[in-house]
Image (cartoon, rainbow, N blue to C red):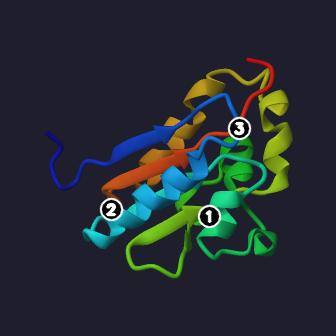
Amino acid sequence: MADATTMRIFAVANQKGGVGKTTTTTSLGAALAERDKRVLIVDLDPQGNATTGLGVDGRQFERSVYDVLLNDVPMVDIVEPTGYNNLFVAPATLDLAGVEQELTSVISRELRLKRALTSVEGDLTTSSSTVPLRLDS
């Protein structure tokens, strides 16, 4: 069992679109936040529906999850508050649509998100992510 300082990470993923990945992620995040857990939702979908669904305007950011994955910007630098206590979002922008292709030559690209989450680990007990639909899988 995790202690109070250990962050738990949940990933909601499915190849099929329209199955409720974003709804599940935001609902789970909101429920955990209501139980006094500090929750970060990492929106990895270029459409940014988790970002906007939490009341955050995704067009207002200089940096997003794209910058975390591609430019090594610390996750903590992009986290935005939502309108809910204890609930935060790492916003997605349309730039994410090309990040996979841009990372093809980067060594250890599959570990970039894991490493980025360590920059917020002491501040949060839960992190959820909504994973984009991949058509080439």
Amino acid type shown at disc 3? Gly
Residue at label 2? 32
* Label 2 vs label 3, nearer the camera: 3
What is the x, y in percent for residue 4? 18, 55
What's the residue at 25%, 68% (across, down)? 35
What's the residue at 65%, 53% (across, down)? 73
Figure quadrant of residue 1: top left
For label 1, count other residues whose C-alpha is less than 10 Å away and answer few (under 14), some (14-19) or many (20+): some
Vertical arrangement, residue 60 with respect to residue 37, above or below: below
In the rendered structure, which disc, 2 or 1, sits on the residue that comes first in sequence?
2
Residue occupying the far front of the picture: 19
Local secondary structure at mark 2: helix
What is the x, y in percent for residue 11? 48, 39
118 on left or right of 59: left
> What is the distance, in whole Å, between disc 1 and disc 3 at their CAs?
26 Å
Residue at label 3? 17
Residue 78 numbered mark, or none:
1
Vertical arrangement, residue 132 with respect to residue 55, above or below: above
Local secondary structure at mark 1: loop
What's the residue at 46%, 49% (across, down)? 128
> What is the distance, in whole Å, between disc 2 and disc 3 at their CAs?
25 Å
Closer to the camera in the image, 16 or 2:
16
- Quarter of the image containing the C terminus? top right
53 on left or right of 98: left
Figure quadrant of residue 55: bottom right
Amino acid type shown at disc 2? Leu
In the rendered structure, which disc, 2 or 3, sits on the residue that comes first in sequence?
3
> What is the distance, in whole Å, between disc 2 and disc 1 at their CAs?
21 Å
Local secondary structure at mark 3: loop
Residue 133 is at least partly visible in this image: yes
